[in-house]
């Protein structure tokens, strides 16, 4: 081997270096730009998981759509769920720019290869859960997504900017349900407290493992897919949410929760990571139902999609025949 | 029935149609064959829900007994509901949902077109606002009937079966009773019997394009306007009214 060959970087190395320089300079990466395969795969995994979460997330809320307690609440919930479906569509399209089809992504979801946010494996047991989901789950999602608005991958960042506006609307609507119930009858207040008790910890889990336990995070931060660490985002969410719970007059189910003057943040207890792993790995109450609902909708709808394709094909032939 | 009571009943008929169909469409949420269709069905459901809220609110105002949209939606039992039998029928498969939808959309389009000229300005306003939505609903359901009818053999069969299964419910949409006649005489309401030929023609055109045939079914059922419903309505109401019934003192 001669000196020139060993010293000259291989093509990929040069490209990767140029890529990192671009990322460091805060230039957005666009679909046609060169990117490391691992960057592409990390994004496909993260973005498709995000898209799946929007769509699976329609199910626990849809569970109360036919039972909403007033026509106004029904309309607001229906519009919210529709927004979530729209987020799903938007994110699937953004992920497709990385060279994977929606069908492939569905396949990964349905075979369990791709995940969705584990929070949707918890059941919605009372109307207050709809409030708690809007307030806490959408609230946690916004905290994550605001950081993602500055993601290095252009289509993902743009999707997040568009989605964030709607999510903050959802969060306020959810909080408003909680407020109405917290100020309502003793039974309603009990429902609101119970919902907070059940959704608080799973919401904190939405930010993922602790930084010390999140080996992939460092690479994502370097690529500027992630801009803030799991623990930073979790802290941000806790700090924003505790005063909101106080205003509701509800108690956050954490004995270790207290303001730390020195840090300027709330201290809070340790997440039950055994429970987290347990639900992620399939032992939540609704894992099987959620997945089955999606698989059934997809497989049960195949004849409809086939018909639409067959009809479109016939139309194409007919217009070709007419033109000839 | 006094004239005021007749107007209230007339408005409930309109509002209940929209509400019960909207409620049925809500059941599809998260389960449609395509994500785009999930959004479209929700969209239509939202329109119908919006119509029902305007109509029930107005019915409550005319009645003047302090019943608002929620009192009317959540505190009436089966016999007091005035929606068509067609609309309370279960969703079934996607073909059945689209057959039900097209039958109703085609009817509601003609009905609201006439209602937009109602001598009652508030009702005319609601109809005018709604007709834009209904135009889209009718195109959406008709397009699906055409796609499924002229799609694959399987979809063709399913679509024809769905049309046949629901045909016996369409006839009561065109019945005129005392309330209808009184409202027609006042220029408030519509002569729905007179809408049948236009409805038939529209349906026939869609079915022809869809390579489907007009159902040949000899049975027909009627009576929703006297509160004679199928067994399905009770379950729709049990689900829809649960919270309001279980916690009557609560505000939501
Ligand atoms: Fe969303
Ligand atoms: Fe949301």
Image (cartoon, coloured by chain):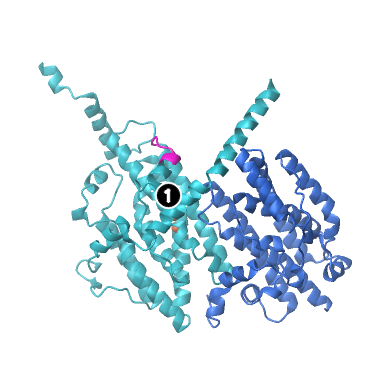
Chain colours: A cyan, B blue
Instruction: Evaluate whether residue B242 shows in this view.
Output: yes
Q: Determine if the magenta segment contains residue A103.
A: yes
Q: Nearer the viewer, residue A158 or A323?
A: A323
> Which residue is disc 1 drawn over?
A161
Instruction: Give the magenta part as a residue range.
Output: A98-104
The residue located at (38%, 76%) in the rendering is: A193
Q: Position of residue B4 (x, y in %)?
A: 80, 76
Q: Nearer the viewer, residue B156 or A148?
A: B156
Q: Determine if the magenta segment contains residue A42.
A: no
- Left or right: A19, with A294 as reference point: left
Q: Nearer the viewer, residue B232 or B120?
A: B232
The residue located at (35%, 47%) in the rendering is: A114
Kindly indicate the quadrant of the structure image that contains residue B190.
bottom right
Q: Position of residue B112 (x, y in %)?
A: 76, 58
> Pointer 1 indicates a residue of which chain?
A
Residue B129's place in the image compared with A10, above or below, is below
- Left or right: A155, with A254 as reference point: right
**Dot 1, how many residues are within 10 Å of its Cα: few (below 14), some (14-19), or many (20+)?**
some
């Amino acid at each position: 081997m001669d000196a020139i060959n060993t010293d000259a970087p291989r093509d990929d190395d040069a490209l990767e270096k140029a890529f990192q320089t671009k990322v460091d300079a805060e230039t957005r990466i666009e679909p046609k730009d060169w990117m490391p395969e691992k960057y592409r795969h990390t994004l496909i995994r993260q973005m498709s998981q995000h898209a799946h979460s929007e769509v699976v997330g329609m199910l626990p809320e849809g569970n109360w759509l036919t039972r909403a307690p007033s026509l106004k609440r029904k309309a607001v919930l229906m519009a919210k769920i529709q927004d979530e479906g729209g987020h799903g569509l938007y994110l699937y399209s953004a992920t497709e720019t990385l060279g994977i089809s929606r069908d492939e992504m569905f396949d990964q979801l349905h075979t369990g290869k791709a995940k969705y946010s584990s929070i949707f494996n918890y059941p919605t047991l009372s109307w207050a859960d709809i409030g708690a989901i809007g307030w806490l789950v959408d609230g946690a999602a916004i905290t994550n997504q605001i950081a993602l608005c500055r993601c290095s991958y252009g289509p993902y960042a743009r999707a997040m900017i568009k989605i964030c506006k709607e999510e903050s609307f959802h969060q306020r609507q959810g909080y408003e349900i909680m407020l109405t119930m917290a100020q309502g009858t003793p039974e309603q207040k009990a429902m609101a407290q119970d919902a907070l008790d059940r959704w608080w910890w799973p919401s904190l889990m939405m930010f993922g493992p602790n930084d010390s336990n999140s080996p992939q995070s460092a690479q994502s931060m370097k690529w500027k897919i992630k801009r803030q660490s799991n623990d930073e985002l979790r802290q941000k969410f806790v700090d924003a949410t505790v005063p909101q719970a106080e205003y509701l007059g509800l108690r956050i189910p954490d004995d270790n929760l207290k303001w730390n003057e020195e840090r300027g943040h709330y201290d809070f207890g340790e997440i039950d990571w055994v429970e987290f792993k347990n639900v992620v790995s399939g032992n939540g109450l609704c894992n099987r139902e959620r997945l089955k609902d999606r698989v059934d909708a997809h497989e049960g709808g195949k004849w409809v999609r086939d018909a639409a394709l067959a009809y479109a094909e016939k139309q194409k032939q007919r217009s070709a025949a007419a033109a000839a | 029935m006094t004239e005021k009571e007749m107007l209230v009943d007339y408005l409930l008929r309109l509002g209940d149609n929209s509400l019960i169909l909207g409620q049925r469409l809500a059941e599809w949420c998260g389960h449609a064959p395509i994500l785009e269709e999930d959004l479209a069905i929700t969209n239509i459901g939202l329109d119908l829900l919006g119509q029902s809220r305007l109509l029930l609110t107005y019915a409550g105002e005319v009645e003047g007994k302090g019943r608002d949209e929620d009192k009317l939606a959540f505190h009436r039992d089966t016999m007091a509901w005035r929606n068509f039998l067609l609309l309370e029928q279960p969703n079934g498969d996607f073909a059945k949902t689209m057959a039900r939808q097209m039958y109703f959309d085609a009817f509601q389009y003609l009905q609201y077109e006439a209602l937009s000229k109602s001598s009652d300005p508030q009702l005319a306003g609601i109809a005018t606002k709604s007709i834009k939505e209904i135009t889209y609903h009718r195109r959406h359901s008709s397009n699906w009937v055409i796609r499924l009818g002229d799609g694959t053999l399987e979809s063709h069969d399913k679509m024809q079966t769905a049309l046949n299964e629901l045909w016996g419910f369409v006839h009561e949409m065109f019945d005129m009773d005392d309330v209808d006649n009184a409202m027609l005489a006042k220029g408030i309401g519509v002569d729905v019997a007179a809408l049948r030929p236009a409805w038939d023609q529209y349906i026939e055109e869609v079915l022809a394009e869809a390579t489907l045939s007009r159902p040949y079914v000899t049975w027909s059922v009627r009576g929703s306007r006297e509160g004679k419903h199928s067994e399905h309505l009770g379950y729709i109401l049990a689900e829809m009214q649960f919270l309001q019934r279980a916690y009557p003192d609560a505000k939501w």
